[in-house]
Structures are given as C-alpha cells and as structure tokens.
Image (tube, rainbow, N blue to C red):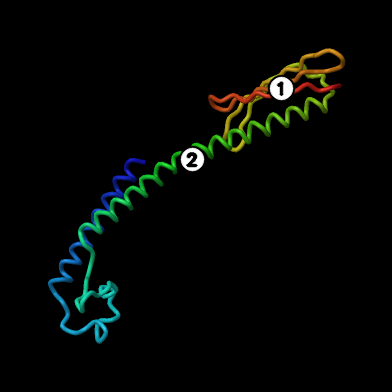
Amino acid sequence: MVSFAIIAVFGLMVFALSCCAFSIVNKQFKPKKKPDQKYSHHLLYLSNTEGGNMKKGFTLIELTISMFLLCFGLLAMGSFIGVMTKTTIQGKQITVASTLIQDKFESIKNTGFVINAGTDTGNISGLVYSRDWVVNPNGNNMKQIDITVTIGSKQFVARSIIAE
C-alpha cells in the first residue's frame, strides 16, 4: 500500500516537472505566426488569451495545487481499498457461516431431533470452517439447538428453540 503511494507521488512529480519544462521551452520558442493560421491544431494553444497575448502552459502554483489535490485523492482512494477488501472478506465469512448454520438447522429438523451433538469441518469457497452443534431438551416437547461455526478466529453462534 505504501509502495503504491510512493510510486504515485513519484509519477506525479515527474509529470509536473515535464509540464514545467514544456511550459518553459514553449515560452522561449514562440512561433512567429498567429495560432489561428498554421498552429491552430496544436494543444499548446488551448489556453485563453488576455490583451492579445497568448498565455501558454501552467504556472508553478497551479501545478503545485493540482499535484497536492491529486496526491491527496490517490492516497484517500488507496486507504479505502484496504477497508473495502477487509469488508468484503468479512461479508464472505458471514455469508458462509449463515449458510452453514441454516443448513445444520434444516438437517437437524429433518432427522427428527435424534442427533444430540456433533462436530464437522470442511472448506467452502476457500474458507476452512468448524461447525459444532448441541440439541438439548427444553421441556414440553421443545428442543434447544445451539450451533457454533468457527471460521479462522471468528465465531458465529446461533440458538433456536423448536417444537418437535
């Protein structure tokens, strides 16, 4: 992340120096004809005119401000990339854990609550998980089901009470 920022700042500095050099060279070697005759197709004449004189290139202050704004924007975007990546990974873990919990609830209901406890492990979408469940009687033909899914260092716990 830091190396990307250093490369971006270095690239912007090279760009700014080349713009300054172009501006200096452009001011030293002025064409003798007006831009609307022979040189109107060149990009260096896209700036405005004041009092009949052509203003060419950028000033040093304009370049400095634009470099500062561009660097600030790139660094802000670079920091958001890390946050977005972390959030995407967390979202994937939550989705996989929710799917595993729902799948186990359905399989316990379909077996008639004869399973009291168990553990299984596996790999879904590149995430290694461990799933533990416990079914306890809760009186009056009710069963309490506790399911814990562990992905990496995160645990996702769900509890439900279901009538037989």
From the viewer's perspective, is residue 69 above or below residue 162? Answer: below
Residue 35 occupies quadrant: bottom left
Residue at the (57%, 37%) spot, across then down = 91
The answer to which of 72 and 126 lies nearer the viewer is 72
Q: Does dot 1 land on a helix, a strand or a loop?
A: strand
Report the front residue among 46 and 102: 46
Check the image and name the residue furthest to the front: 51
Residue situated in front as seen by the camera: 148 or 128: 148
In x, y percent, where is residue 139? 84, 12
Q: Position of residue 154 (x, y in %)?
A: 56, 25
Judging depth in this view, the residue of 127 and 144 nearest the camera is 144
The vertical placement of 66 against 101, above or below, is below
Q: Position of residue 82 (x, y in %)?
A: 44, 40
Lateral position of residue 43 relative to residue 163, left or right? left
Q: Quadrant of the N terminus?
A: top left
Q: Is residue 84 left or right of residue 26?
A: right
Image position, residue 77 (x, y; %): 41, 47
Q: Residue at x 29, y 56 (%)?
A: 66
- Lateral position of residue 100 relative to residue 138, left or right: left
Q: At label 2, which amino acid type do we have?
A: Thr
The label shown at residue 159 is: 1
Give the quadrant of the C terminus: top right
Q: Describe the element under mark 2 as helix, strand or loop.
A: helix
Spatial CA span between label 1 and label 2: 30 Å
Of the two numbered discs 1 and 2 on the same chain, state the one appearing first in sequence: 2
Q: Which residue is mark 2?
A: 85
